[in-house]
Image (tube, rainbow, N blue to C red):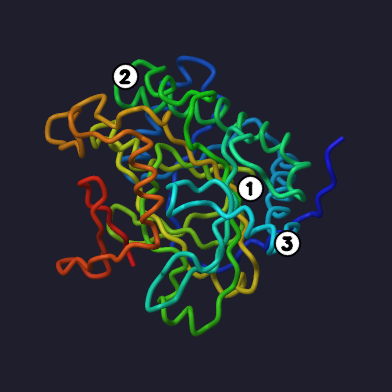
């Protein structure tokens, strides 16, 4: 019998009229056959060209299982004391690892305003580090959830991405071994409402526009509307909540491995519409990365597309993730004089951009 967790009641779905991103949907139940994967890979290819994001439905977990993982996620915040959270703070700047807590106000957003979100990150190997006592009874369920995300969702998606690139289906799967050393993790994240003064100082931006540094991000859809993607026409559009669906995007490492064919997607988090303000925003993510030892050199080259790295100068996944983790929200960014609202830093010779 599962350990009791108080039910987390999410915000009602917004009724605001917003500019929504028209994202395509991948029905993952069709991925069990070759014909299904061929059809789905076409959807993925179009999605990556036009949006960089897509939905996944029929992933195998039902609405009750979905609600349960959000209840467990909230235990990490509402059920753990501030003192215990301090004990298990992640060594982000020291070790380049997110494992543990990221406290509120760790990242600088804009004009002296710091973030109002905290998250708790659990490596797919739950034994990598200790956990708060109040959270330990839920570790078997969290471990099962990470394995399900990795093998039943991530791996099928990697086969589709490989097809898009014209590579053998198992090429990317073989770089994402569940038992290997790496930082692939579940993230439970909770945003808290901010003051009106903070909203004005940051132009309602809660998290600057950025790309993820891993290969694939799996976001479990939740109703607070705050996620925006930078569409190909350079317009920020909201991602609509789809009950029990997943929102998928590519990160830097997949862009590097694909030789620039699959672009890491720029996205940000902003203040929700008026009818959802005052609610917390609880998120559940699976951030996938290759095994730490994998070099992020292009697996394929296409005429007219310049890859970020060559075989000779490509960093390993461990190098890239530690550098990005240490720098994010802590380094001094340089404004791009040619593009308004764009700030930059250089990591491993690559210009990393942040969009305000």
Counting from the top left corner in percent of width and height, residue 120 is at 60, 51
* Mark before the other along the chain sequence, 3 or 2: 3
The reply to whether dot 3 and dot 2 touch (C-beta < 8 Å) is no
Tell me where residue 146 appears, x and y as whole percent: 61, 34
Q: Is residue 330 left or right of residue 344?
A: right
**With respect to residue 347, does 34 lie above or below?**
above
Would you name the residue on which mark 1 appears? 243
Q: Which secondary structure lies at badge 3? A: loop
Query: 332 and 268: which one is in front?
Result: 332
Out of 180 and 246, give the one closest to the viewer: 180
Quick one: SS at disc 2? Answer: loop
Q: Is residue 140 above or below residue 252?
A: above
Q: Which residue is mark 2?
A: 167
- Which badge, 2 or 1, comes first in the chain's sequence? 2
**Residue mark closest to the camera, 3 vs 1:** 3
Instruction: Give how far across and how far down residue 266 sits, in percent.
Output: 35, 53
The residue at the far left in this view is: 304
Q: Quadrant of the C terminus?
A: bottom left
- Discs 2/1, front: 2
> Mark 3 = which residue?
81
Classify residue 280 by image quadrant. bottom right
Give me the residue at 50% from left, 37% from top.
Answer: 184
Q: Residue furthest right?
A: 1
Q: Secondary structure at mark 1?
A: loop
Crowd tier of the residue under label 3, counting other residues whose Cα lies within 10 Å: few below 14, some 14–19, many 20 or above: few
For label 2, the crowd category at 10 Å Cα-Cα, with few meaning under 14, some 14 to 19 and many 20 or more, is some
What residue lies at 28% left-to-right and 36% top-to-bottom?
315
Q: Give the class, few, some or many, for how many residues have Cα within 10 Å of label 1's Cα (few <14, many ≥20).
A: few
């Amino acid at each position: 019998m599962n350990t009791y967790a108080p039910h987390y009641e999410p915000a009602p779905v917004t009724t605001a009229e917003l500019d929504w991103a028209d994202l395509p949907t991948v029905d993952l139940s069709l991925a069990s056959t070759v014909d299904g994967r061929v059809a789905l890979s076409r959807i993925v290819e179009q999605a990556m060209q036009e949006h960089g994001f897509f939905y996944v439905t029929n992933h195998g977990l039902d609405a009750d299982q979905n609600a349960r993982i959000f209840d467990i996620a909230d235990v990490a915040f509402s059920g753990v004391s501030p003192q215990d959270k301090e004990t298990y703070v992640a060594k982000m700047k020291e070790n380049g690892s997110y494992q543990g807590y990221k406290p509120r106000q760790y990242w600088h957003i804009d004009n002296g305003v710091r973030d109002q979100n905290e998250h708790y990150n659990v490596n797919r190997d739950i034994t990598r580090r200790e956990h708060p006592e109040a959270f330990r009874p839920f570790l078997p369920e969290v471990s099962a959830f990470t394995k399900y995300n990795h093998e039943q969702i991530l791996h099928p998606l990697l086969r589709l991405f490989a097809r898009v690139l014209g590579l053998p289906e198992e090429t990317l799967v073989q770089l994402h071994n569940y038992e290997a050393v790496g930082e692939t993790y579940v993230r439970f994240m909770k945003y808290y409402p901010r003051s009106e003064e903070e909203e004005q100082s940051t132009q309602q931006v809660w998290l600057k526009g950025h790309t993820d540094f891993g290969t694939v991000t799996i976001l479990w859809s939740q109703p607070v509307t705050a996620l925006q993607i930078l569409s190909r026409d350079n317009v920020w559009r909201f991602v609509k909540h789809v009950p029990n669906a997943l929102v998928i995007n590519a990160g830097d490492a997949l862009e590097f491995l694909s030789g620039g064919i699959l672009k890491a997607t720029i996205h940000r988090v902003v203040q929700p519409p008026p009818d959802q303000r005052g609610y917390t925003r609880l998120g559940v993510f699976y951030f996938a990365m290759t095994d730490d030892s994998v070099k992020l050199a292009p697996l394929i080259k296409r005429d007219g597309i310049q890859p970020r790295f060559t075989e000779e100068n490509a960093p390993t996944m461990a190098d890239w993730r530690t550098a990005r983790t240490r720098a994010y929200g802590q380094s001094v960014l340089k404004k791009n004089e040619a593009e308004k609202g764009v700030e930059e830093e250089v990591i491993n010779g690559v210009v990393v951009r942040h969009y305000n």
